[in-house]
Image (spheres, rainbow, N blue to C red):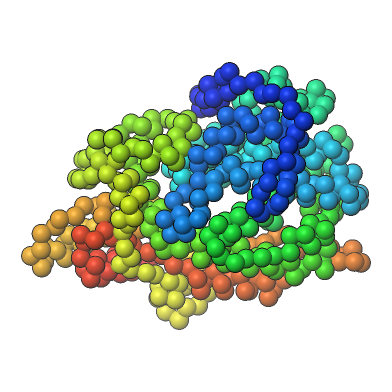
Amino acid sequence: MNGLEERINAFVGTLLDGYIPEKNEGKFIHDPIWGSVFYSDWEIQIIDSPIVQRLRGIHQLGMADLTYTAARHSRFEHSLGTAAIAGRMANQLKKRGGEYTVTDYDVNTVRLAAILHDVGHCFYSHLSERVYGAVKEFTDLMNEKRIKSAPHEFMTYLIITSEAFAEFFFNYVDFPEKEKHPDVLERAANIVVGRKNYDENGNGLTFLTSILNGEFDADKLDYTQRDSYTAGIAMTYGVDRFLMKLMITAKCDGESKDFVLAVDSDALTTVEELIFNRSILYVYMYRHQKVLATESSLRDVVLGMEDVGLLKDIADFLKYSDSDIENFDTVDTIPFEEQNNLLTLGEMIKKIETRKLPKRVAEFSLEKMERSGGDESDYNHIRSFIAKIAEDPDKIREQIFEKICDAYFERGKIVDFTLFDIYVCFPDMIKTGTDFLLVSKDGRVRSVADIKYIRDWAEAFAAEKWRGYVFCNSNVDREIAAACSEKAIRGLY
């Protein structure tokens, strides 16, 4: 166990200290998305634990409610919903049968992974993980364990596989026949990070991982429905038909087999709906300019917490909920003081809470950024450029700031703003590749990625709808900021 694992283990041990779950017979929980869902005794014991309950304090969508006022649901509801749909997927595969026989243990392992899949999330969800996920100690440990996943998924892996959680699980949780499966937590953690498990004959069980970490997994099926529902964005797709058509197919993997998730080809219409809805949700919600402006402001808060010593360690990110951050009004320390920031951390947070958000001064599309005729090489260059800026937005932020200051000096204007009044947000391109298998009635297998009209539509939609932004606070001259932003961006590509 290395240092980071020890500190995560200590956090888990402190959180679970004194919690002994009560015996129960399971219960129904009513959900606006999936209806009345039954959770068994052992699931309630985990759901009621502080490890899962802390997710009540972490919003699924950060502070997107400043734009979509009803989008206040938490990672807790989403986790329960993901377990509900993951269970339905696994049970459908068990019912349908096939070359691989799905067992109750398989179903329970998937549900266990689904309940726990987000316990590694920290305050403001994906925003904070972009900070700790770039820390060398964190990435080194991921490389050491040969795990390629999102940072919050790896954080979940560390929690599930910690000694403290294992002690709690094997001492107090009535997971069926857990004595026969001492590696169940490792297998559940593998599912969370997208790693393949194997059966006793060495055959790969990729389909189990794909139920939770795949192209059309329970996680995506839940958040697509739940997020659009709370945002008031009408979005429907044939979930029941999709589940009914799920199947397992086998791929040869040397002398053994790999059992993978697939769907009957006559469910292609539903697959199209899923791809379309996912793309629409990214454009109209996750990449809404007001949501991005809020996230840009919140990023400074997270970095500011590091700067004033509230986040001295990666494990510290787990200690705070969204509401904890919102109550930092009394923090009188000024972060980034050496860079002439004028606001305390509390004031930075209060500005966001009262919707004193930066305004858009420059908007960039792929078409606007094309240097010549928009040929394929130019398009690929722009995509690479976007990814480069997304990795280090502070560099271009500083360049825009310097250009605005120079423009102020040339016009004899007083510079009454700082670097922290300027925000750059160039989000990654929407994922367009969809490697999901379709099986025809005669047994032919093909990937959705090979269907040209779907691939072309997804790529065209992602390209057409992508937008990058420069935002500024109201004390910055918008006309000057717009011209300097254009000049700085064009000068880089």
Question: Where is 400 relative to 179, above or below?
Answer: below
Q: Is residue 181 left or right of residue 486?
A: right
Residue 156: x percent and y percent? Answer: 59, 36
Residue 491 or 184: which is nearer the viewer?
Answer: 184
Which image quadrant for residue 434?
bottom right
Which image quadrant for residue 25?
top right
* Residue 196 in view, yes or no: no
Question: Where is 161 relative to 251, above or below?
Answer: above
Could you tell me which residue is drawn at 65 percent across and 34 percent down? 47
User: What is the number of callouts on the image?
Assistant: 0
* Residue 416 in view, yes or no: yes
> Which quarter of the rendering shows the N terminus?
top right
Question: Where is 330 relative to 274, above or below?
Answer: above
Could you tell me which residue is drawn at 36 percent across and 38 percent down? 327
Residue 140: x percent and y percent? Answer: 52, 35
Which image quadrant for residue 105?
top right
Residue 324: x percent and y percent? Answer: 41, 36
Q: Is residue 135 left or right of residue 35?
A: left
Question: Where is 16 relative to 109, above or below?
Answer: above
Residue 173: x percent and y percent? Answer: 72, 25
Query: In the orientation shown, which residue stands out farthest toward the bottom?
Result: 373
Could you tell me which residue is drawn at 86 percent across and 39 percent down? 103
Could you tell me which residue is drawn at 23 percent across and 44 percent down? 343
Q: Is residue 457 left or right of residue 290?
A: right
Residue 343 or 393: which is nearer the viewer?
Answer: 343
> Which quarter of the rendering shows the C terminus?
bottom left
